[in-house]
Amino acid sequence: MAFDNIVIPPDGKKIETTGDELNVPDHPILAFIEGDGIGPDITSASKRIWDAAVQAAYGGQRRVAWMEIYAGEKAAQLYNGNYMPEETFEALREFTVGIKGPLTTPVGGGFRSLNVTLRQMLDLYACVRPVRWYQGVPSPMKHPEDVNMVIFRENTEDVYIGIEYESGTPENEKVARFLREEMGATFFEGAGIGVKPISAFGTKRLVRKAIRYALDYGYDNVTLVHKGNIQKFTEGAFRKWGYEVANEEFAAVTLTEDKLWEQYNGQRPPGKVVIKDRIADIIFQQVLLRPREFGVLAAPNLNGDYLSDALAAQVGGLGIAPGANIGDHIALFEATHGTAPKYAGLDRVNPGSLLFSGVMMLEHLGWREAAELIRQAYEKTVAQKIVTYDFARQMDGATKVKTSEFASAVIQNL
Ligand code: NAP
């Protein structure tokens, strides 16, 4: 395939997929979007660490062939004002794995958000956010070491789908009339109206991914988070369909929490993943008070959005929280914070969020040794109190370093 501005690295090979399996060559082509604002600073620092870790783990046998693709302001310069060129989507469809820095959403650019556009165009239906603590990272928790959870947030439906009717418009009046006259609904005059679709298809593909992840990464429970006590046919249906997929497709390796108590007196049989559910409001309390009881959490879009950021705060905040948006085949890893424009180009910010998104990417490729090396080197560096400004202001006796210097310290510790 020929692109206008994207250069396919000649020394790399494409990752292929067979069914659900990734076939990763030794020199895979990985796409990256540098990002706007602080994007270039954190991308160049993180790439140095990822490359050094792969080299340290596999001694030159494996190496990433990086392929830059474009979105945001850099794309607008290269593609005549187009912030999200078609060939960026084509490259991700073809090469399937990529990582991105944060993007500014252009005001009045015709996009709700570049990130939402990417997720929708590529059908990246699962937003995956692992939340765990690293020794030495400042946290508001008494026992942050007890937090080790992974949130699977549904990315393509729920109120985010954008079916909304503004108060005072003819469309709003038409929908309101239908609801009142034909469906017998009652609500205040002039109310804005939004629609919340949640489907069996959308729920089951998300929960399926969450259960597979728990099995692959050794988590012993999956919690369905929902507000089904109030929103019975959307959030409640999410719960019902979640249990269904566990029962229909994973009966041999899962059991419900009810069965755990009825048949096993609360003692989990080895090898089984416990499927449970919690109402969305209570989960915010329980992840704070009893974090050890939760492993993988699967949630519809809006609740998952809130929960992801709240959980990230428990282990040091968005500055180091990694994330990925994953579909059936394509996986796009991303920093979870924004472009922090006031720090753009200053070489000051924490590269942790993008760095750990890359750690997730290495795990996704099956390169777990390199991923683990980065974790250990990062922890060692923070334990030495070598940190960027954001951590330095919360720690006593820290050495405050630049983004690039932090990367060098991590590489030193690999
Ligand atoms: P932001 O860029 O996340 O920055 C808010 C604050 O968070 C920063 O001022 C800084 O706090 C802290 N911060 C963010 N990243 C950091 C890092 N790597 N290291 C240390 N501290 C970090 O949020 P925003 O200012 O609301 O949004 C700015 C732009 O980003 C907007 O255009 C928005 O649309 C976009 N955005 C993009 C994404 C994405 O691409 N995924 C996500 C969110 C927002 P202090 O000031 O306390 O130092």
Image (cartoon, rainbow, N blue to C red):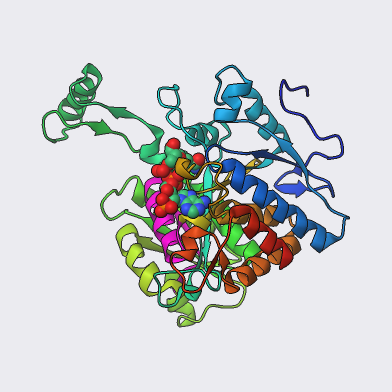
Q: Position of residue 395 (x, y in %)?
A: 46, 70
Q: Residue at x 44, y 55 (%)?
A: 308
Image quarter of residue 286: bottom left
Vertical side of 258 occupied by 339: above or below: above
Is residue 201 something that shows in the picture?
no
Q: Residue 112: say if magenta.
A: no
- 136 to the left or right of 186: right
Vertical side of 191 occupied by 60: above or below: below
Q: Position of residue 247 (x, y in %)?
A: 52, 59
Between 90 and 200, the residue placed more toward the observer is 90
Q: Residue at x 88, y 55 (%)?
A: 61
Q: How many marks?
A: 0
Is residue 308 something that shows in the picture?
yes
Q: Position of residue 63 (x, y in %)?
A: 82, 50
**Which region of the structure is painted magenta?**
293-317
Between 294 and 277, the residue placed more toward the observer is 294
Q: Main secondary structure of the magenta part?
A: helix
- 353 to the left or right of 194: right
Q: Position of residue 119 (x, y in %)?
A: 53, 37
| Quadrant in which the N terminus appears | top right
Q: Residue at x 67, y 63 (%)?
A: 410
Image quarter of residue 55: bottom right
Q: Residue at x 43, y 58 (%)?
A: 224
Q: Residue 295: say if magenta.
A: yes
